[in-house]
Image (cartoon, rainbow, N blue to C red):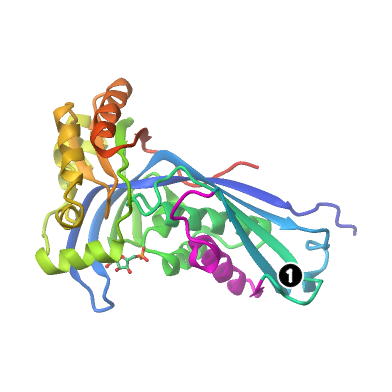
Amino acid sequence: MTHTSRAARRVDVCVPAKINLFLAVRGVRDDGYHELVTVLQTVSLRDRVSASLEGDLPFDQHPSVRRRMRISLDHDGTPGVPDGGDNLVVRAAALLGERLGMSAVEAVAQAARVQTTRLAISKTIPVAGGMAGGSADAAGALVALNLLWGGGLDVDELRELGSQLGSDVPFCLAGGTALATGRGTAVAQVLCRGAFHWAVGRPDGHLSTPEVYQAWDAHERPSTMEPDAILAALSTGDAEALGAALVNDLQPAALRLRPDLADGLDALRGGGALGAVVSGSGPTVLGLARSADHAVELADAVAEVLGRSQVASSPAGGPELLR
Ligand code: C5P
């Protein structure tokens, strides 16, 4: 029997950002993470992750070639995007490669017969902005490389690997609208009707998620709040009720570190937002609009005080294959 099909030599995946419509911190866990109850939704800001095999080694024909793999990373120069092994996509590649029996080799490997997988990221999601940009990229890399390398892992297996990379990665692999508990990695889809329109305020600078959690530790108390109002608003598609029910227990901690974000929230509220909230650990701020046109107005208002803004709609799906 002859084998005629060749594996893909390039896979491109689009991955959406996430927002937390509800985020309650229940306390600190034994492993040092915080126990969360959170409702997440993907929004229409997307990064693109590409994975390609370089050179003309017969990757798909000779299993020995895939035992060692050189990984390289390019990105579009967006400030703050980590290089090399500091980037979650490279860590995703190493983790998946290890799971598939490959070993990653450094760029200056002596052996000529080492295949190179080139990863490239093109960013739209704010970097370290509280919208899971790094986690979305890691989810995209897992999906792309599982296909490129013929890994054959199913969604549950990818999700398990994803949880080792970051708390938001399992949700980013699924997308849509979900309730997550534990570290944020136990994810169950929930009903969402309709679409929502957002202004996304993007101040300069980043916030470190561990530092925001440390500020929460120092100044905040565990919350017992339940997400019932959010889940009800989502199930009926009621934007007004959704806006009134937005909750983020990390917001006071983020505002301690970045008091200027309060001006962004005020601008959104002053512009008639149905609700305004810091996104995750910040510093991105979100305003829920009454319509797509209203989102543009709110985006202008928040850009005046925070510098930059975008509009987005939700929910978006999960990672999407482009080729
Ligand atoms: O899981 P991830 O690596 O994305 O988390 C980044 C940091 O955020 C952790 O190192 C931890 O400080 C904090 N974190 C937490 N509890 C969570 C999720 C994140 O304390 N549930």
| Residues drawn in magenta | 77-106
Please check the rendered image and state whether residue 15 is part of the magenta-colored stretch, yes or no.
no
Q: Is residue 113 left or right of residue 233?
A: right
Tell me, yes or no, whether the highlighted magenta stretch contains residue 94.
yes
Q: Which residue is under mark 1?
A: 66
Establish if 106 lies above or below 308: below
**172 and 128: which is toward the camera:** 128
Q: Quadrant of ligand 1?
A: bottom left
The residue under the point 38% across, 53% down is 132
Q: Residue drawn at (16%, 47%), measured in percent from left and top?
A: 228
**Quick one: 291 or 211, which is closer to the camera?**
211
Q: Position of residue 93 (x, y in %)?
A: 58, 65
Residue 186 quadrant: bottom left
Amino acid residing under circle 1: Arg
Circle 1 SS class: helix
Q: Determine which quarter of the picture holds residue 252.
A: bottom left
Q: Position of residue 57 (x, y in %)?
A: 82, 63
| Quadrant of the frame with the C terminus | top right
**Vertical placement of residue 188 versus 322, above or below:** below
